[in-house]
Amino acid sequence: MAPALAAIAALLSAIAAPTHVAGLELEFPSDWFPVRIPRVTREDLALPGHEELQRGGAPFILTNALQSSEALTDLTADWVKRKFGSRHADLYEHGIRDTNDKPVITSASDALEFVENSGLAGNGSYAMVRLGATQTAAVRALMSPGYPALFDSDWWLQSCLHSTAARDNVFLAVAWSILIVGSDSAGFHLHWDSINTGTFQFQVAGTKHWVVCDPRGEESFYDPGDIDAFAPDLKAYPAFREALTKHCAHVAVAPGEALFYPSNWWHATKSDGATLGFVGRTVTRWNHKDVHQALRKRCDNPAPRTSKPPPKGAPPALSKEFCSALDTCAELWADRFSVLEERSLERQAASAGTTRRMLDGTVSHPDPECRTAPQDRRDCSAGTHGECIASGCCWGPTRARCSTPGGSGSLDGASDLCPWCFAPA
């Protein structure tokens, strides 16, 4: 451990404190937090009537996100140290109470050790372990079958970024995927996330309390970092009362659950006990144009060079390889979501008893085969699910090939998990 961190950790561990802290008790006036965030299972999410949630248009809690996976038993702080101990982490020694709280960049092992010791001393601290695409895949391997299609980024990463270096770069440059470890009472001030993506967080250990606020009320939110959403000073920030009584929700997310919120939704957190969560970004039909614009702005306007080198371990700038491929990625996003919208209209027509419209196979796509008429495409109906996915784009007679192995085979899960030009003939 770095000398400064070691000294602080030693001091914290020497302070007499109980090893177990009672559960976080929060009490709020009855008129606060009127917004209700639905709690759904993976099976519920695939049913008709949940289209807004399936597309990432509203926040929700997935109650059985990890109940059948190894993540709850295997994904621990010790596992993170073993697998990613030498990777860089951002350590917030006193949590992130406002925008003045800046991280110490250190190794993941040292950061997690500090968080563990600060928890014994009753001081809330956070460690954010940065993951590249490669490390994210290792974490995801523990989460099967809990990873909904909405949260998946592989479908575009593999198609438009052809090197591991480019995929790792974007993950690290914009914190596309991170592990967050917090001690008891660690908090994060009210804020919104950058680059306009949707965000999900799997709760692996401990319970995390959230205040989540609809951006339509942001005029009453003040600036990021101004508000302690769990104990707001309404004398100093009187307009926030409107947020509390009209625009915000309070939820507790327990181990095995996952919270999703769309782009630009404000949020604050507080840990109840030691917590560990896996956080990721996602592109949806609602935000893909804004994500493209935000990433293009970063590519075209990189941070100015200074005579002082960046601190060791600082996140990289977006690479030339990624920036060159960005517009191709954006075309994939636009085409995918136009096809999914077409399929949604088909289902709505079918459920209404009207004639079902089939895809005409003429959607814009960089692969010419995906623009040909259905009868001219490769037939993958005789192949396995894996072979169908590996073929890139093909045409089959049913949606059955699109179902997740061992899954329910729902239309929504299918259209999200298969090559997106794969459809019934």
Image (spheres, helix red, strand yellow):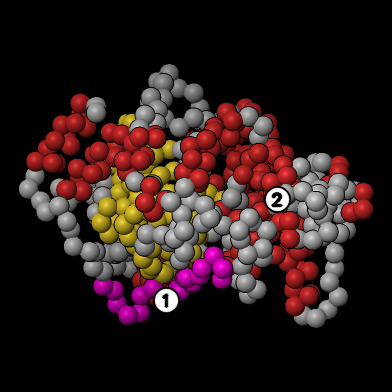
Measuring from the top left, give residue 210's x and y in whole percent: 37, 62
Q: In this figure, which residue is indicated by the disc labeled 1?
A: 34
Measuring from the top left, give residue 319's x and y in whole percent: 58, 29
Q: Residue at x 65, y 73 (%)?
A: 48
Measuring from the top left, give residue 81's x and y in whole percent: 33, 36
Q: Residue at x 61, y 58 (%)?
A: 406
Quadrant of image for the C terminus: bottom right
Q: Can residue 90 be seen in this view?
A: no
Q: Dot 1, how many residues are within 10 Å of its Cα: few (below 14), some (14-19), or many (20+)?
A: some
Which amino acid, by three-letter code, is at mark 1? Pro
Q: Which residue is drawn at 47% across and 64% down?
A: 64
Which amino acid, by three-letter code, is at mark 2? His
How many angstroms separate mark 2 from mark 1 (CA)?
44 Å
Q: Mark 2 or mark 1, which is nearer to you?
A: 2
1 or 215: nearer the viewer:
1
Q: In this figure, which residue is indicated by the disc labeled 2?
A: 385
Measuring from the top left, give residue 337's x and y in whole percent: 71, 55
What segment is highlighted magenta in the picture?
A: 27-44
Furthest-top residue in this view:
307
Q: Is mark 2 on a helix, strand or loop?
A: helix
